[in-house]
Image (tube, rainbow, N blue to C red):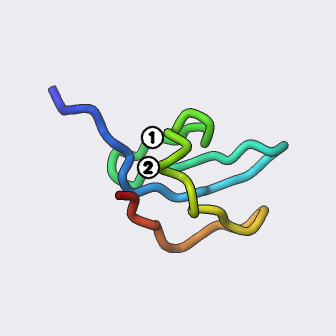
């Protein structure tokens, strides 16, 4: 059994109706930004409707 992913490398893949959808580059899970620890996403803002080609590593 694998350990729990800490989602340390994430990417915003979509934004709809004020909700960010995040893709974890470590485990492949896609989830709503609200499900991720708010401190972990601070400073990870991107332009609305834009998809990033690079991931920002989180501490």
What label does residue 14 carry, if any? none
**Residue 12 x, y percent position in the rendering:** 59, 57
Which quarter of the picture shows residue 43?
bottom right
Taking depth in this image into account, of 36 and 52 the one nearest to the observer is 36
Q: SS at mark 1?
A: loop
Which residue reaches farthest front? 39
Residue ID at (84%, 43%): 17
Which residue reaches farthest bottom? 53
Q: How many marks?
A: 2
Which residue reaches farthest right? 17
Q: Are marks 1 and 2 in contact (CB under 8 Å)?
A: yes
Residue ID at (74%, 68%): 47
Relative to 36, residue 39 above or below: below
Q: Quadrant of the N terminus?
A: top left
Residue ID at (33%, 51%): 26
Taking depth in this image into account, of 39 and 46 the one nearest to the observer is 39
Specify few, some or many for label 1: CA neighbours under 10 Å numbering under 14, 14-19, or 20 or more.
few
Which residue reaches farthest left? 1
Kindly identify which residue carries mark 2. Answer: 24
Specify few, some or many for label 2: CA neighbours under 10 Å numbering under 14, 14-19, or 20 or more.
some
Q: Earlier in the sequence, mark 1 or mark 2?
A: 2
Relative to 9, residue 6 above or below: above
Q: SS at mark 2?
A: strand
Kindly identify which residue carries mark 1. Answer: 29
**Residue 15 x, y percent position in the rendering:** 74, 51
Spatial separation of the CA atoms under disc 1 and disc 2: 5 Å
**Residue 59 x, y percent position in the rendering:** 35, 58
Residue ID at (56%, 48%): 22
């Amino acid at each position: 059994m694998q350990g729990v992913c800490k989602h340390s490398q994430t990417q915003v893949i979509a934004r709809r109706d004020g909700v960010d959808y995040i893709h974890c580059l470590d485990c492949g899970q896609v989830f709503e930004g609200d499900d991720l620890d708010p401190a972990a996403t601070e400073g990870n803002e991107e332009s609305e409707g834009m998809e990033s080609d690079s991931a920002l590593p989180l501490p």
